[in-house]
Image (spheres, grey):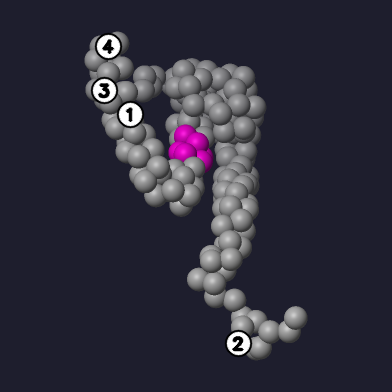
Amino acid sequence: MHLPAEDQTSNSLSDRRRGWYSSSHRYHCGYILRNIWSTSYQRLIGPFAVIIFYLISVSKHTASGPGWYLGVEEETNVCAESWPKSLLMINTDIKYICHAVTWYVPCDYQLAILGTLLFYFYQKNRRLGFAIFAVVAVFSMVIPGVLTYWFRLPVVHFLDVG
């Protein structure tokens, strides 16, 4: 069946009425999420791998001074043990960080994944997405406070240097 020229162009309202929008929209959102996660990982992993390589193999040979070797040797050993987790962006345990950057970048990547998931749920169902966002926001404020009180931790975490 041949349609007139003005009917051949599709607009989003008629596509939604026919049900085409919802099925392609679901596929499209999943594709966009995977694309965001993979491009974000590819964007971060190159410079991050160079930093880890530098910290493991080169940094101990680049400077000198009293106490320089003490901190660098420990940092290098921790990096040498935990580099696979770091490159997979799952090393967020503060005990096993070899440098502040090697903790921050995986946390940033994981929070980007959480943010895109929250946005995905918001796009699927605005009420459900907003409810999930509210629960995550409340828990992200309550949990650190409860853990800080429970374990009697200092409010500000200082790194022991030197």
Mark 1 crowdedness (10 Å alpha carbons): few <14, some 14-19, many ≥20? few
Tell me the residue that label 2 is attached to. Answer: 6
Q: Is residue 104 visible?
A: yes
Q: Residue at x 40, y 42 (%)?
A: 128
Magenta residue check for 109: yes
Name the image quarter holding residue 162. Answer: top left
Amino acid type, mark 1: Phe
Mark 2 near mark 3, Cβ–Cβ under 8 Å? no
Label 2 residue SS: helix
Separation (CA) of disc 1 from disc 4? 16 Å
Tell me the residue that label 1 is attached to. Answer: 139
Amino acid type, mark 2: Glu
Q: Magenta stretch mostly in which secondary structure? A: helix
Q: Return the residue found at the far top.
A: 151
Magenta residue check for 100: no
Which quadrant of the rendered structure holds the N terminus? bottom right
Of label 2 and label 3, which has the lower sequence position? 2
Q: Residue at x 46, y 18 (%)?
A: 95
Mark 3 crowdedness (10 Å alpha carbons): few <14, some 14-19, many ≥20? few
Residue 150 shows which numbered tag? 4
Of label 3 and label 4, which has the lower sequence position? 3
Tell me the residue that label 3 is attached to. Answer: 145
Image-based side of 61 in relation to 154, left or right? right
Mark 1 near mark 4, Cβ–Cβ under 8 Å? no
In this rendering, the answer to whether 159 lies above or below 21 is above
Of label 3 and label 1, which has the lower sequence position? 1
In this rendering, the answer to whether 54 lies above or below 70 is below
Mark 2 crowdedness (10 Å alpha carbons): few <14, some 14-19, many ≥20? few
Range of magenta residues = 107-115
Mark 4 crowdedness (10 Å alpha carbons): few <14, some 14-19, many ≥20? few
